[in-house]
Structure formats: structure tokens, C-alpha cells
Image (cartoon, rainbow, N blue to C red):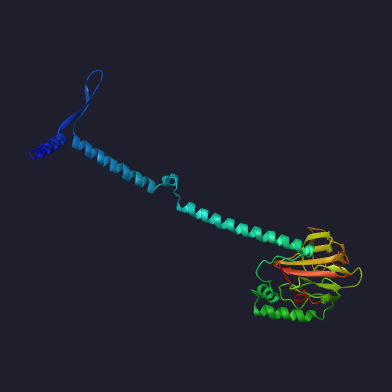
């Protein structure tokens, strides 16, 4: 048996090295077209090298060409970046839609006299509002503004313009009268009640666009104006409205007539509210009544 194994190995090696001739003939004339001398060892070697080259070539082709993007489960860097940007954009749009929905809901609550939804954990204080509005104002501009405001205090044409606020523009007094009920956010009284003479004209406190001009059962004839810099003014319990929804108004322009409309009204007056960035602020901190 021991002598048999070396002989079998020699026979196997011999078979691998045996020469064979591959001849290609013309089927009609039997003319020899191609003749190759091969061995089994050469065939195995050529096939092995070809397989390695094929695998290497396929790997390089996939790694350095766009073909890799067609492989299931593979995503390129650019696709991942686009997907991330789309996810961020979608999240921003979702937040903006939520903000707009809450903003519109707050306007409805303002009209109906219901509790509002806070856009933040706490109400924005008037001091914070003033700090935000005064960003970017130089010291020289502030001094010049204070000088002009002091001069306007004795100007008959501008006695109705507020000299207290420093928001970058001047507020117009909606109506001259007596304040009977002040601002009290804790008790959900988000404005001030002003009593004036019968049929007194109510004026817009700033330039803006009328976004609501309708009748409600609780607050009567209500008018809401959207101003720049995230300000919103509300005028309730009017006897008549002089502006329609969508109309542009100027500061000091008549917009309504003082009245006693709505279930929540107890006498002729105007309930005036001032909102900043979706939160109520005290009108007396911005306007000299």
C-alpha cells in the first residue's frame, strides 16, 4: 500500500502534464484553421487567472463607476445628503405649518374671547419685545430719536403719537378716552378697555392690512389688523366697522366706530389688544393714552 500511493500521485501529476492538441477544422474541407497544444495544468491555470481578473475587474468597475448605485441596498453619499436635506426641510415645513395653525387658532380665540395658546412656555414680556425691536440701533440713532420724540410732545399735529415706545416706528392712539380696565394676562384680559364719547371714531394704531372684519356673538363687531414686525392689533365691541377684510390701512386712519356690541360688553367702549409674535403685550407700554 505504501508503494502504491507515490505511484498514484505520479500518475495524477503525469495526467495534468500530459499534452493535448486542440485542433479547429473546416467542416467541409477538413482544413486546419487553428491548432493549440494544451495540458490540463495549463487549462486550470488559465481559467483560474481569468476568474481572478474577472472578479477584480468587476469590483473596480462597481467601485469607481455609477453602476454601484444600482446595487440593491446601496446608497451613494450624494443621495444620503439629499435625503438628509429633504428630511430637514420637511421638519422645518412641519414646524412652520404647526406655527401657522396655532397662530390662526389664536386669532380665532382672540375673536371669541377664549384662552390663547402660548407659542412658548411663558408670555413674552414687554421688555423682551423692546430689546428685540431695538437690536441694531446705534447710540447716535437712539439719541436723535429721543430728541425728536421730546420735540413732538409739544407739537399739536403729533400729540396723538406715542413718545414712549422705541420700536422703530410710532404708534397712533386708537381713541382718546378713559381706561377703565387695564391689561391683566394672568386673568386672561389681554387688552385694555377704553371708554370714550358716543360715536367716537376708532383709528388704526399702525399701518397694516385688515385680516378680520366680522361680527361675533360675544365680542360684537371685531376688527383685526396685521402690522409689520409681528405686531397685531385687535378692536372689539364696535358699533360699526369701516374697513373690510383685505383692505390696507394707514396709521391714524378711521377703521371703526366705538360701540357696545357683543354679549361680553357692559357699556360703550372699545376693547383694544396689542399682540407681538403671537403673544399679548400691554398696549400702555407702547402707546400714551
Displayed quadrant of residue 150: bottom right
Q: Is residue 85 visible?
A: yes
- Residue 89 at x, y percent in the picture: 58, 57
Q: Is residue 71 left or right of residue 213?
A: left
**What residue is shown at x 78% (from left), y 81% (from top)?**
151
Q: Quadrant of the C terminus?
A: bottom right
Residue found at the far top of this picture: 28
Query: Closer to the camera, 188 or 150?
Result: 188
Q: Is residue 57 left or right of residue 104?
A: left
Residue found at the far right of this picture: 198
- Residue 19 at x, y percent in the picture: 15, 32
- Residue 185 at x, y percent in the picture: 74, 72
**What residue is shown at x 85% (from left), y 78% (from top)?**
156
- Residue 142 at x, y percent in the picture: 69, 79
Q: Is residue 219 left or right of residue 8?
A: right
Displayed quadrant of residue 86: bottom right
Tally the numbered discs.
Answer: 0
Q: Is residue 224 visible?
A: no
Residue found at the far left of this picture: 3
**In the figure, 257 relative to 150: above or below?**
above
**In the figure, 219 relative to 286: above or below?**
above
Q: Quadrant of the N terminus?
A: top left
Query: Closer to the camera, 93 or 286?
Result: 93
**What residue is shown at x 27% (from left), y 40% (from top)?**
50
Displayed quadrant of residue 230: bottom right
Amino acid at each position: 500500500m505504501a508503494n502504491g500511493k507515490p505511484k498514484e500521485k505520479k500518475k495524477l501529476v503525469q495526467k495534468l502534464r500530459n499534452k493535448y492538441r486542440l485542433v479547429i477544422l473546416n467542416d467541409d474541407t477538413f482544413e486546419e484553421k487553428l491548432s493549440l497544444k494544451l495540458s490540463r495544468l495549463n487549462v486550470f491555470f488559465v481559467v483560474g487567472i481569468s476568474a481572478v481578473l474577472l472578479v477584480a475587474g468587476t469590483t473596480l468597475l462597481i467601485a469607481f463607476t455609477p453602476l454601484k448605485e444600482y446595487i440593491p441596498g446601496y446608497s451613494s453619499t450624494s443621495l444620503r445628503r439629499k435625503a438628509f436635506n429633504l428630511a430637514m426641510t420637511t421638519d422645518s415645513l412641519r414646524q412652520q405649518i404647526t406655527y401657522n395653525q396655532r397662530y390662526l387658532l389664536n386669532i380665532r380665540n382672540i375673536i371669541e374671547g377664549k384662552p390663547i395658546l402660548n407659542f412658548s412656555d411663558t408670555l413674552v414680556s414687554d421688555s423682551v419685545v423692546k430689546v428685540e425691536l431695538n437690536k441694531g440701533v446705534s447710540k447716535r440713532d437712539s439719541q436723535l430719536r429721543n430728541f425728536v420724540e421730546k420735540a413732538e410732545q409739544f407739537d399739536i399735529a403729533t400729540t396723538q403719537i406715542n413718545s414712549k415706545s422705541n420700536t422703530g416706528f410710532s404708534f397712533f392712539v386708537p381713541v382718546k378716552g378713559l381706561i377703565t380696565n387695564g391689561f391683566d394676562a394672568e386673568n386672561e384680559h389681554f387688552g385694555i378697555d377704553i371708554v370714550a364719547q358716543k360715536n367716537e371714531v376708532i383709528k388704526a394704531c399702525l399701518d397694516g392690512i385688515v385680516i378680520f372684519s366680522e361680527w361675533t356673538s360675544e365680542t360684537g363687531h371685531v376688527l383685526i389688523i396685521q402690522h409689520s414686525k409681528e405686531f397685531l392689533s385687535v378692536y372689539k365691541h364696535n358699533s360699526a366697522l369701516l374697513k373690510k377684510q383685505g383692505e390696507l390701512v394707514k396709521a391714524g386712519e378711521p377703521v371703526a366706530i366705538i360701540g357696545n356690541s357683543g354679549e361680553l360688553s357692559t357699556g360703550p367702549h372699545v376693547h383694544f389688544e396689542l399682540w407681538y409674535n403671537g403673544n399679548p403685550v400691554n398696549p400702555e407700554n407702547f402707546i400714551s393714552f
